[in-house]
Amino acid sequence: MNLSKNTPKITIVTPSFNQGSFIEETIDSILSQNYSNLEYIIIDGKSTDNTVEIIKKYEKYISYWESEKDKGQSEAINKGMRKSTGDILTWICSDDLLTENSLEKAANYFLENPTVSLIHGKTKTFGEGYKDKITAGNHSDLSIDYFTHMAFPQPSSFFKREIFESQSYVVGNHKNWVDESLHYCMDYDLLLRTVLNYELLKVDELFSEYRLHPASKTVSDWSKFEVEKDKVFLRLLNTLKTKKEAKEGIEFLKELGIESKESESNKTYNFDNQIVSKIDIEKIVQMFLYRKIPVLFDAKEYETVVLYCEALQKKYPNFYSKMNLDSMYQTSKYNSLSSLGKLGWKFKKLI
């Protein structure tokens, strides 16, 4: 693909802290794109390993970098984005990689689709002890998926600058592109602010490689992801609560212990009325809860799986039957029994 002379500027921000084992690969994957209009920014949280030494090795090719203490990845992303001047923005963490020519491909998609504000593609998960896997998220129905979870791999997404300019949180004199109170689902929160206002496009391109390793949040902190995902989803329902289905969804989740804290209950998003008019809120609530069940099952949170399955079975019996949850439900019901209860279960099976 050949870009026109109007090559859009792309800003890549890399948030970093003590990733000296990986960051050189990340930097090389970005600089080796040889993209003619690249702005590359690295925000390091004052690493104590060899990270800064590696950054200095490449600093003549880096538009801006700093190494100062921060409050984590979200603050680092915001610091970088406030320094950005690109037409297209994204962040690539210091243990992930861009694939060859991904920036040129992304730029072309934007040039060919001028009404689109976010483009997303596939990633390859990899890492020592993990089998390589290509994923683009779970695309059963993107009109639902966009609202229920982070529906695509963040390293393979590219945003138009207008999203930063119009959808950032204004905090004091700063624009925060991502919510600094979120450390795990800041990308899902950004996705909701985007999909409620702009056109998105899924493309069949492998843009990135996402590294799995014991220290990565995806591997080590699944439960914290779930807590933040609940918080962000409830922001969506609070945004839509003038609609009957959203009110019912809030009450339904509250009965299951999923509810907003008082400080969160008034947090809402702005939105485009035409986009919101097309949202199937009931289906989104169903799918949100459905997506939690396998995660909890894998984590052996059997009592919660039973609670969620029975709630879906009671309120949405057709949906429950269609989604084939009964095997996880029965297994969880058995595993949540006491030793005596399990013995009685087995005895019933014999007679």
Image: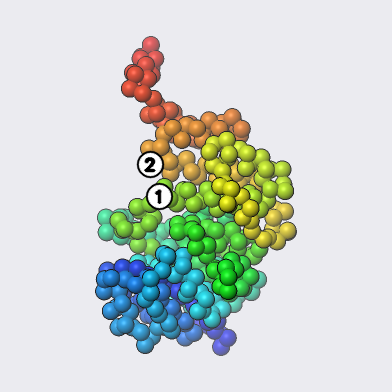
Residue 136 seen in render? no
Quadrant of res 349: top left
Report which quarter residue 32 is drawn in. Answer: bottom left
Left-right relation of 334 to 129: right
Residue with the mark numbered 2: 299
Give x and y (percent) for residue 111. Answer: 59, 77
Residue type (three-letter) at the residue carrying disc 2:
Ala
The residue under the point 35% across, 68% down is: 17
Crowd tier of the residue under label 1, counting other residues whose Cα lies within 10 Å: few below 14, some 14–19, many 20 or above: some
Please name whichever residue, 111 or 223, is drawn nearer the observer in this view of the structure.
223
- Report helix, strand or loop for mark 1: helix
Task: State the CA–CA distance, disc 2 to disc 1.
Answer: 9 Å
Cβ atoms under marks 2 and 1 closer than 8 Å: yes
On residue 222, the disc is 1
Q: Could you tell me how many numbered marks the image carries?
A: 2
- Packing grade of label 2 (10 A; few <14, some 14-19, many >=20) is few
Q: Nearer the viewer, residue 230 or 325?
A: 230
Kind of residue at badge 1: Trp
Q: Position of residue 108 (x, y in %)?
A: 54, 76
